[in-house]
Amino acid sequence: MSAHRSTRAPALTGLLLLATLVAGCGGYEATRVPAPPAASGTPTTQTTPPPECGEATRSYAPTGALPAPTALPSGSTMAQIRERGRLIAGVSADTYLMASRNPFNGQIEGFDIDFVKQVARAIFGSDDPRFIQLRVITAADRIPLLQSQVVDIVVRNMTINCTRWEDIAFSAEYYRSGQKLMVRQDLADAGVDSVAELADVRVCAPSGTSSLENITRLAPAAVVVPAGSHTGCLVKFQQGDVDAITGDDTVLAGLAAQDPYAVVPEQETFTDEPYGIGVNAADVDLVRFVNSILERMRTDGSWRASYQQWLQPTLGQGTGQPQPIYGRTP
Amino acid sequence: MSQAQASSPAPVPRPTTIPAPAGVATPATRAQAGAGLAGRPTGTVEDVPRLLNRWQAIAVVTCIAFGVLAALFQLLAWQATGRAADNTEQLVRVQEIQSSLFRADALATNAFLIGGLEPADQRAEYDAALDQVLRQITDAAQAQPADRDALAALNAAVSAYATTNTQARDNNRQGFPVGAEYLKSASAVLRTDAVRVLQSLVRANTERADTELDGQNTLPLFLTGAVAVALLWWVNRQMARRFRRRFNQGLAAAVLMIVVITLFGTFFSAQRSGDNGDLRNGDFAVALDEASARTAANDAKANESLRLIARGSGDVYESAWTTAADAVDGAASPQTLPLWQAYVARHEEVVSLDEAGSWDAAVAEATTTGAEGSSQALDAFDVASQEVIDDAAFLTTDNLRSGAFTALVLIAVTLLVGLVAAGAATWGIAQRRKEYA
């Protein structure tokens, strides 16, 4: 029997080992950790020289005095807006001082918004919120939404230039801004205060804007980083993803006011940015109407009052309301 | 079973010497046995004691192997059921992490709409939701080591989400518009980084739970019994050829025991397997579907707020709302679907007001905690949905964990049967050895 035991013992031991091994199985393969999505590379911006169109700020002349809201020309764009019951304006909601949402009351307010109110007042006789639908849009949306007539006007620190005249129409210039740089305090201390100093500096500008085109053209050695808006640039700036932001001085003033470590160094503007109110290219009557409103704002002091309220505290006295240039024909 | 004499065929006549009693090999016949017992060709030499030893070894190993393997399959099935319960709990935990995160996001975005002075109870609920998320991540990491790397990544994403949300709130309280941008960034972190990891966790734990629910080993258990019976039958047949006994009592007893325990074990395993299938399509599915519905519902509410924050350019958020709403419609249980539909009606009023240019009224309807607002309707759905998830998850794991006593007794009895069957086979073969001696 000992011989039998010796043949049975290894078999049983093997069986028990197998059982132990199999019973011990229960570990799982580690759960896959998804790789982060590949970061999209910096988009290359085609920088083509803007087409020539003479004086880009030349607009359609007003036709006489501003009509009363109740006497708007029949069939005009203004009459259609009045019939609809509200003016639809494309604006920004995150451009501090120009047009931003006040978190305390939820209302969008700023220098640009005052122009929307003026247009509403001219059409409805009142700037009551029920006559105004503010549609918050990105810079890249400005022209498409005007072309598709989703909005009646765009008042969103929009620069008048010949390229845009090919797609839409503009009012006369209502503010003369200029592109500048905002940088981190330590970079400013190190002397980075102009486009000539931007080699290898990461500069942010909103996609679809002339600011992005300008910085790409004027500072080819800079690392240009696009964002959805200037506020998006500020988030990147505060998170250390970019070192500088470029944009109009009005916008940069608003950004710097939100971050104590951001400065707009003393510098010459490296572009001229004449702001105009954007209108659908076919609505020439509305452009003339808006230009009449701008004239009225000059004479009744409302332009100055608005500037004093929003921009003067950070931009100083300024040069006042720009003189309009008329003579454009449809 | 009696050790009955075989009625046929008649013992093969020995070629020489005195005829031996039927079925008994006397010493005098050993030489002939060496030359061959019943039915063996006379030209070959057969060592019967050695054959008996070999058959005994085969029978004993078969019985013990059956006991060990059958018990092992039952043990594995019992462990699989336990692991299925663990994986189900983990899956529900992961789904709840997702639901809680989206709940937090719905609260944060809604509070943002109200402005800097958000309601204290809403803020407290946001904090509680995030605390719950962090606790659940820790619990999940302890419960399933294989999920730890993914949960670490999720923890990083939640941390980034919470930090970005805090920056949004801080800026909002100071009146800085950059707060809205941080809020959008936080939502993007949640919907990309966090959700990608959560989806991976859901996938992995669903697969694990499914695999374990299928791990009842019914067929292997049955086959083990069948093979054991076949081997014992073969041993019995070999012995029957050499002795005038059709059945060996010991072997017959072993076969009987193995057949009974195999049939009982197979029945129990098949029943458990059927129960698991019912659970998978019943409470388990309800828990998972409702958790998905709760996540999607809070996602929808967050998108409603983001739409209003975007103020007029919120088409992308309305599209996201529609996608989330479709997900709720497809996953919500009959108990919660009416509550969801009540919220949908409120949301449509919000959209209608916003599209008509009454943004202020739309915001008021989206943020009020009164019965006329969309928030209360969503809250009602959220509470009911959580109850459905908790109940269904409890029923699932409770059901899976039940029957442990029966399973363990069955395992012990199976092992015992293997040993007793081995003893019976040994005894039965020993009887033949005695006869031969």
Image (cartoon, rainbow, N blue to C red):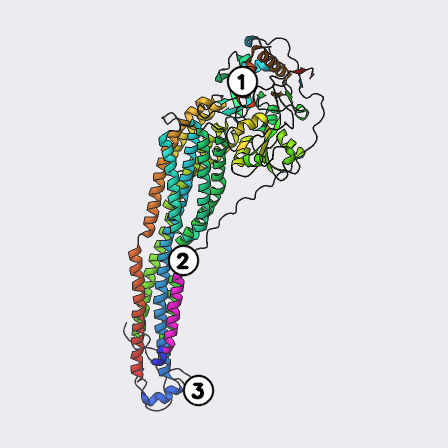
Task: Evaluate whether residue A256 shows in this view.
Answer: yes
For image coordinates 37% across by 32% down, the residue present is B122
Residue topped by disc 2: A26
Asked which secondary structure carries label 2, the reply is: loop
Q: Disc 2: which chain?
A: A
Q: Relative to residue B125, is residue A289 drawn left or right? A: right
Residue topped by disc 3: B43
Residue A6 is tagged as none
Membership of A30 in magenta stretch = yes
Label whose residue precedes the other's in the sequence (2 or 1): 2
Labels 2 and 3 positioned on one and the same chain: no
Q: Disc 1: which chain?
A: A
Give the spatial CA distance, label 3 vs label 1.
127 Å
Disc number lying in front (3 or 1): 1
Disc number lying in front (2 or 1): 1
User: Badge 2, how many Cα within 10 Å: few under 14, some, many 20+?
Assistant: few
Residue range of the region highlighted in magenta in the rendering: A6-35
A118 and B401: which is toward the camera: A118
- The spot of residue A126 in percent (x, y) is 51, 13
Q: Give, as a three-letter code, the residue at label 1.
A: Gln
Membership of B256 in magenta stretch = no
Residue topped by disc 1: A308
Q: Give, as a three-letter code, the residue at label 2.
A: Gly
Task: Evaluate whether residue B304 shows in this view.
Answer: no
